[in-house]
Image (cartoon, rainbow, N blue to C red):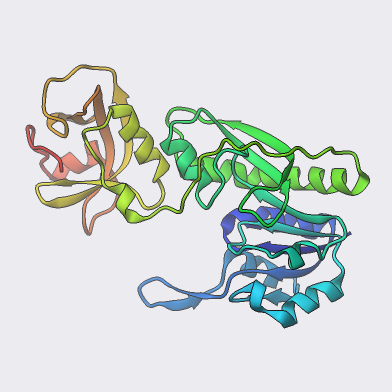
């Protein structure tokens, strides 16, 4: 089976590795190299790093839809499938029509919910109890293609976006193989998506500023959903305090939302619109992430200050 693989971040690497193991991967498409870190050195995508180990031809179109030479090259390769995992570019109908059996996309949500760029984060921010992966036969819409298979994953109350990402990343490869085998043999009947969805728009740093006039549970979900990036934050005495870990305390408070009620080695108790939030791990400018027990060993956190 000839496969063309399109993907970019870490999430796509286990799927690429499995495709290389099971099939004949004739080309890999990934996003162009980007400047990274303080030195702004050009960095390869995680998928490019993996493809280089296996000496697979790599293509990095700025915009695939405008790259006539590459589109013609893909036609020459005559792939049975194009497999897409977090590639980061929309595919035109011309490209979708190239492979014999179609283009299969692995998407990190239970479609039709959470179409879009950040499905893992938004599922947690919205307090979902279940997530998973869905494979679909791609069409020209954004994550609107007919669904092939789903794999459900439970979301415990303290799971972060990073933890869910790693589970879905490792489980996606099996779903892709089952989908490829099922579609090529005609064993799977695809299912149309319904219209009900929540669009999981790309994250930006503006969402990370905590609004204490929300419930403790909503804030707890935001903290989990923005870990490991961009990390929720609040201002303590005009200093930015990034918050990595929290817990909800079902306790009434008449204090103004954002008020620090108590500080102990177990955490910082903060009044919310509803219930109380315990902040358990923080990071201040030029410091490392620390538990509150570690932080108050050398620093003071004052009670009655209102977090902004």
Residue 208 drawn at (x, y percent) = 31, 48
**Residue shown at the point (76%, 37%) measured from the top left:** 191
Q: What is the residue that sits farthest to the right in this orientation?
A: 185
Q: Pick the quarter of the image with the C terminus.
A: top left
The residue closer to the viewer here, 266 or 15, is: 15
Decide if residue 209 is on the left or right side of residue 87.
left
Decide if residue 94 is on the left or right side of residue 230.
right
Q: Pick the quarter of the image with the N terminus.
A: bottom right
From the viewer's perspective, is residue 68 above or below residue 281? below
The image quadrant that residue 202 belongs to is: bottom left
**Residue shown at the point (12%, 32%) measured from the top left:** 259
Q: What is the residue that sits farthest to the bottom in this orientation?
A: 69
Residue 5 drawn at (x, y percent) = 73, 63
Residue 48 drawn at (x, y percent) = 63, 69
**Residue shown at the point (57%, 75%) measured from the top left:** 32
- Total labels drawn: 0
The residue closer to the viewer here, 190 or 301, is: 190
Q: What is the residue that sits farthest to the front in this orientation?
A: 195
């Amino acid at each position: 089976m000839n496969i063309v693989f399109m993907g970019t971040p870490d999430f796509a690497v286990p799927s690429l590795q499995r495709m290389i193991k099971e099939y004949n991967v004739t080309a890999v498409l990934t996003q162009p190299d980007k400047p990274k870190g303080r030195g702004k050195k050009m960095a390869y995508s995680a998928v490019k790093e993996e493809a280089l180990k296996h000496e697979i031809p790599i293509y990095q179109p700025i915009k695939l839809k405008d790259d006539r030479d590459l589109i013609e090259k893909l036609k020459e390769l005559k792939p049975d499938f194009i497999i897409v995992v977090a590639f980061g570019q929309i595919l035109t109908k011309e490209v979708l029509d190239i492979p014999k059996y179609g283009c299969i996309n692995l998407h990190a949500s239970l479609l039709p919910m959470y179409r879009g760029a950040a499905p893992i984060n938004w599922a947690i921010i919205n307090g979902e109890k279940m997530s998973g992966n869905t494979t679909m036969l791609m069409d020209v819409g954004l994550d609107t293609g007919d669904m092939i298979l789903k794999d459900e994953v439970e979301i415990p109350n303290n799971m972060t976006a990073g933890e869910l990402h790693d589970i879905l990343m490792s489980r996606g490869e099996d779903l892709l193989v089952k989908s490829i085998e099922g579609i090529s043999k005609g064993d799977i009947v695809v299912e149309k998506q319904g219209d009900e969805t929540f669009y999981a728009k790309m994250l930006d740093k503006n969402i990370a500023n905590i609004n204490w006039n929300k419930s403790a549970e909503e804030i707890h979900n935001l903290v989990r959903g923005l870990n490991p990036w961009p990390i929720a934050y609040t201002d303590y005495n005009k200093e930015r305090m990034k918050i990595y870990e929290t817990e909800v305390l079902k306790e009434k408070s008449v204090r103004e939302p954002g008020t620090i009620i108590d500080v102990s080695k177990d955490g910082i108790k903060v009044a919310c619109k509803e219930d109380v939030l315990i902040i358990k791990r923080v990071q201040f400018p030029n410091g490392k992430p620390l538990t509150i027990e570690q932080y108050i060993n050398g620093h003071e956190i004052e009670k009655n200050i209102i977090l902004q």
